[in-house]
Image (cartoon, grey):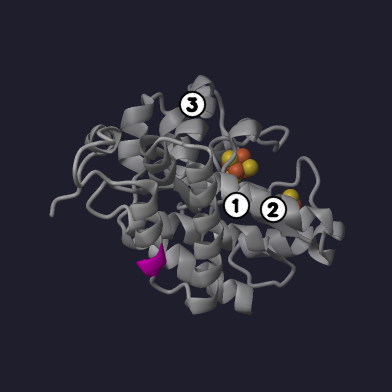
């Protein structure tokens, strides 16, 4: 069955009294059966529990199924749930947080070696593109380092899209800035990594994609390509079309994040 467009899915979802129309309970059933390549059962089960609790809350408060589908498809659901987990972690911050060397103007982590910059959702790509678009025509991060994020200020080395920065930028931290500098140049120093909430966010988004198969399409995007398109002056629709990943990118990101968490 050819996947329907988001608009078509919303139309279907809004026909709440049509026989065969999807319900939030149907989506919860799909989540229960979904599999995420490379995530491993413990992480998959954990992400299912978090996403199922979101769906139960949506049912309790009578959230229309069209909104549930739209939030899951855009990545807003993964974003919200990832943030909720992050907030929990921050109530009793681990040593990686309390000993973090991160300061304003330290931007080796904004050097996106390989040109990808990490997997982001449609929700994040839209926000980042809109925040970075007014910077078109100005010197960007690549004036400091050829592989730096275009949203970076090349003089101050601070993020010029701070409020719109994706989850990966909010999750990455390090206890050693020199290790970050070395790793940006291809090194493999220890000390830098992602908060555990990032893994939850990625696997939840991958579960959303599996659960919505045949209902609507769920994409992921390259952060670097999204920011580059914005400062090149593209409109958001064009920018997202250029930055859209192949489906395998999300599976690879989940697998890599699980391996990093186990290292
Ligand atoms: S993650 Fe590394 S490069 Fe980024 S702010 Fe922290 S110490 Fe600096
Ligand atoms: S969006 Fe901001 S924080 Fe993230 S890589 Fe780009 S400049 Fe750095």
**Which residue: 82% across, 59% down?**
93
Relative image position of residue 73 (x, y in whole percent): 38, 44
Ranked by sequence position, the earlier of labels 2 and 3 is: 2
Whether residue 163 appears in magenta in the rendering, the answer is no
Instruction: Find numbered disc 2 in the image and state the secondary structure of the residue it sits on.
Output: helix
Q: Residues within 10 Å of mark 3 (few under 14, many from 20)?
A: many
Question: As drawn, is 51 to the left or to the right of 209?
Answer: right
Quadrant location of the C terminus? bottom right
Relative image position of residue 124 (x, y in whole percent): 50, 39
Question: As drawn, is 259 to the left or to the right of 105?
Answer: left
Q: In this rendered view, identify the residue nearer to me: 20 or 98.
A: 20
**Which residue: 25% across, 36% down?**
17
Pointer 3 residue: 130
Q: Are marks 2 and 1 in contact (CB under 8 Å)?
A: yes
Provide the residue span drawn in magenta: 32-36
| Quadrant of the rendered image containing residue 177 | bottom right
Q: In this rendered view, identify the residue nearer to me: 67 or 184.
A: 67
**Which residue: 45% across, 54% down?**
205
Ligand 2 quadrant assignment: top right
Pointer 2 residue: 86
Q: Is residue 261 above or below residue 96?
A: below
Pointer 1 residue: 82
Q: Is residue 166 above or below residue 155?
A: below
């Amino acid at each position: 069955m050819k996947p329907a467009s988001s608009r078509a899915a919303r139309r279907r979802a809004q026909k709440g009294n049509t026989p065969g129309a999807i319900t939030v309970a149907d989506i919860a059933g799909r989540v229960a059966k979904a599999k995420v390549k490379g995530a491993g059962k413990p992480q998959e089960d954990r992400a299912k529990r978090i996403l199922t609790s979101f769906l139960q809350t949506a049912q309790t408060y009578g959230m229309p199924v069209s909104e549930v589908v739209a939030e899951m498809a855009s990545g807003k659901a993964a974003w919200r749930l990832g943030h909720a987990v992050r907030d929990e972690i921050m109530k009793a911050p681990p040593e990686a947080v309390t000993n973090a060397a991160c300061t304003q103007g330290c931007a080796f982590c904004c050097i996106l070696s390989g040109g990808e910059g990490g997997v982001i959702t449609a929700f994040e790509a839209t926000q980042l593109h809109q925040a970075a678009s007014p910077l078109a025509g100005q010197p960007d991060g690549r004036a400091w380092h050829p592989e730096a994020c275009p949203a970076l200020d090349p003089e101050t080395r601070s993020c010029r899209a701070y409020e719109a920065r994706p989850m990966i930028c909010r999750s990455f931290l390090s206890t050693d800035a020199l290790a970050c500098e070395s790793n940006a140049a291809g090194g493999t120093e220890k000390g830098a990594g992602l908060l555990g909430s990032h893994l939850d966010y990625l696997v939840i988004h991958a579960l959303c994609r599996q659960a919505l198969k045949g209902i609507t399409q769920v994409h992921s995007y390259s952060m670097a390509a999204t920011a580059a398109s914005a400062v090149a002056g593209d409109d958001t629709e064009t920018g997202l079309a250029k930055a859209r990943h192949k489906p395998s990118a999300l599976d690879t990101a989940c697998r890599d994040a699980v391996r990093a968490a186990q290292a």
